[in-house]
Image (cartoon, rainbow, N blue to C red):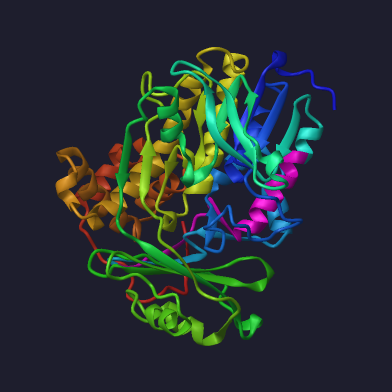
Amino acid sequence: MTAHAGSGHHAIVIGGGLAGMLAVTALLGHVETVTVIERDRYPAGPAFRKGVPQARHLHILLSGGQRALEDLLPGTVGALADAGARSLYLPRDLLTRTPTGWQRRFDERRHPTLCVTRPLLDAVVRERTLLGATASPTRVEVLEATEAVGLTGDAGRVTGVRVRSRGGEPADRAERALSATLVVDASGRGSRAPQWYADLGRPAPHEVTVDAGIAYATREYRPSDPDSAPDVGVNIPGWPQCPRGGAYVPVEDGKWLLTLSGVRGHHPPTDAQGFLGFSATLGDPYVHELLARAEPVSPVHGFRDTCNRRRHFERPDAAPDGFLALGDAHCTFNPVYGQGMSVAALGAVAVRRTLETAGGPVPGFTAEAQRAVSRAVDPAWLAAVGADRPYTTDGDAGAGPGERLATWYFGRLAARAAIDPVVGAAYRDVFCLTAPLSRLVAPRIVLRTVFLPRRPGLAAPPDAVETV
């Protein structure tokens, strides 16, 4: 395909997973060529692969993430639904047990949450991204089974990537350099950007971590009688007095995923009997009772890399020109909150809008784009850190006065949101990444949160749906 875009600019995207494909979509029409560096070889269709270690666990796409995905790749949410992904409206279709009781089922119809296995999501997004590239003036090539081993350039500017093949004859695995105007690191939690920075002679970006020590485990189920399967998902998050949680939701092919989680000293077992027994120790027996009407159809898979970690590439002089971090390479969240994929999509939208404003990857573009990506991260980061802080080894001692006040306020707000349709709507707008954090401190929300009496949620999972 002949390229006519981007005034000769060449971009390299490190990582061909979800964040990498979304980065490619953001770049289309703004550069002449995009080269994707992918460590794995892609499967022929939806299938698990080694390079996505979380793939066997529960994945959701929040409504804000769906909007961003549609902005980047119109029709993709519909394609996922056609392939079997399930949509649950919050809070109508997800029964949630909060620390104060069960949440009421308000029929808001504002926030559809897409429940899907990671292999299906990746396959659909990858197919639509590469198909969209054929209609773009930007030429896209994917180097599979190829590893990025470093950056080229100096402390002031990145000029490309050093790569080597991961297959073939030894002579084929020699290191080589690829030049680029722009390098996007979308390599995920395993990003080696700090080490690459050191090789360029510059300090690593400031990094903040909040680690609650949460681990989780997941197993696939199929209802014994599909006609009597529940028509709603269930979410029982842990809380300090009961630090074990679980979520049970439908995905494609008539299957359901059960993910159990717990903090240090409460990690879910990965043997079948222990996993089942753990499900009976959550803050409510409802999920455990549902399993009596379902058959397991997979082994139990565990995962422990759940630390929230944010690298502040957006700070002044924190990154060389020509380098941009996106997705988990920039900011990772505790996966139990289901934010990561949505934030990656929002970050890619921020990159595309910055490219449109700047007129392409001109000098200085990456600094502005990284700031835009960071702004897209802020709401999810504050929510995840606020939820995990009570479980960290230093607890409140690691938080300043402002964070302690915010933790108190948001704890009270979350309790109010379970029973109050006004506060609940605002809470879900922010949690689902469709509104800024300022929505939660609007005068009406503050007054209802602080001055109305704190009341418990429902004593049992609600059957009735309430119109609002």
Q: Position of residue 41 (x, y in %)?
A: 69, 50
Magenta region: 101-130
- For residue 453, side relative to residue 260 (left or right): left
The residue at the point 63 percent across, 42 percent down is 16
In the figure, residue 358 lies in which quadrant?
top right
- For residue 411, side relative to residue 329 (left or right): left
Can you see residue 109? no
Q: Is residue 227 above or below residue 402?
A: below
Q: Is residue 111 magenta?
A: yes
Outermost front residue: 171
In the figure, residue 162 lies in which quadrant?
top right
Q: Position of residue 408 (x, y in %)?
A: 20, 50
Q: Is residue 99 magenta?
A: no
The residue at the point 53 percent across, 32 percent down is 150
Q: Position of residue 96 (x, y in %)?
A: 41, 66
Outermost right residue: 1
* Viewport quadrant of the N terminus: top right
Q: Position of residue 100 (x, y in %)?
A: 27, 66
